[in-house]
Amino acid sequence: MAKRTFDLPDLGEGLIGATVLEWLVSIGDYVERGAPLVEVETTKSAVELPSPQSGTVVEFHVEAEDDLLVGESLVTFEVPDDAAGIVGTVPEEAAPKRRVRLSLPDD
Amino acid sequence: MFYAVTASGETIAHRREPGENPVLLVHGFGSDAAATWGATGWLRALTDSRRGAIMVDLRGHGASSKPHDPAAYRTRVLAGDLVAVLDAEGVDAVDVIGYSMGSQVARALVRDAPDRIRRLVLGGIGEHEQLRAWGVDAIERVLIDGADVPDETATMILRAAADQPGADRRALAACAVGVASEELPEAPLPVPTLVVVGENDPVAAGADALARVLGAGYAVVPKRNHLTTLSSRAFKAAVLEFLSA
């Protein structure tokens, strides 16, 4: 098993951080990718963030009412080794690369 | 995204999420369907309960027409837009969830077309209609002139609406003035209704009294304000339970 940590993602609209309102999972829960993970508040809205990963939740880096900035650690999952990949990459769920033809056709 | 065309030619943007017994979702002032029901996890919560959804952008908001005449935002007109969307979707009667100004529009829908509603949830409103309480002058000063008004909540909410990407300030001002210009019936409603508000939401002050007047159930979401009530799990749980009763 390997551990993967996820940061607070960019929430758009120039927002630089958020406040955690409520974790929607518990330590030890197995969470499917895309399932509700955590509820956060920004200066403009309240947002429910989906889980970026299927795996077992092993650590919250922030608790309810804590502030954090985009890019700061949010949560750590334990995932099977074949789903963990090389650090910093997401090989399992990356979009397939499109092949681009660089040479001109003969005719 | 689909567009229903009203009798007077405006287009009302709406989107259907597949599932049984779709719920009509009516967002509040200065927001739109995606921000109110998508980002907050509501669509996911409904889908997880096998419910479909019909999301609408109210006129003046999102991808819908944005007239600048306050008369185009009378509650009768806004409720008519919802009927146009239900007709376009081929849906007879639905459960309805409104939030903030969307709840006022939902009340107007009960008044004007009660046979189109099965069960009704009014979120984020209280004894006094907020736009009416703030008054036309304050609304126009913040939205049109970009000024502050003494009521900090009014300044904050109106400014947030004006600063939304794609916001049309004149349309928003016309909408606020139109909605503020009339009172909705304060009598028991003919459909089962639940009022849900955040414990720390000044916009929804007196919601318990409103619930009594409307003959509605009443639920409070602890520790939440006007913004954060929307995404809360407690709000969703209370509503889903009420709608499945």
Image (cartoon, coloured by chain):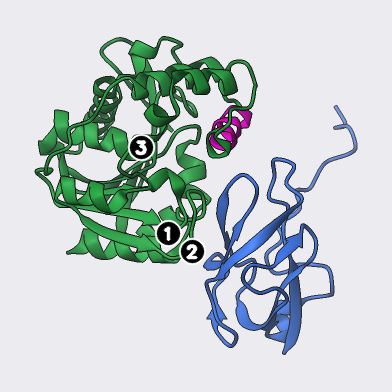
Work out whether mark 1 precedes mark 3 in sequence or the reverse, and give the earlier one.
3
- Identify the image quadrant of the C terminus of chain A: top right
Residue drawn 40% across the image and 66% down it? B234
Q: What segment carries the magenta color?
A: B155-165
The residue tagged 1 is B199
Percent position (x, y) of residue B1?
A: 44, 33
Work out whether mark 3 precedes mark 2 in sequence or the reverse, and give the earlier one.
3
Residue drawn 38% across the image and 61% down it? B235
**B147 relative position to B170: left or right:** right
The residue tagged 3 is B102
Tell me the subunit letter for badge 3: B
**What color is chain A drawn in?**
blue
Badge 3 and badge 2 in a common chain: yes
| Between B17 and B61, the one nearer to me in the picture | B61
Q: Nearer the viewer, mark 1 or mark 3?
A: 1
- Residue B165 visible in this rendered orientation of the protein: no
- Within 10 Å of the Cα at label 2, are there few (<14), some (14-19), or many (20+) other Cα atoms? few
Percent position (x, y) of residue A3?
A: 75, 83
**What color is chain B drawn in?**
green
SS under mark 3: helix
Q: Main secondary structure of the magenta part?
A: helix
The residue tagged 2 is B223
In the image, what residue type sits under mark 1? Glu
Residue lying at the far front in this picture: please name it. Answer: B150
Rendered position, B236 above or below B6:
below
Residues at discs 1 and 2 in contact (Cβ within 8 Å):
yes
Q: CA distance from mark 1 to mark 3?
A: 19 Å
Q: Quadrant of residue A5?
A: bottom right
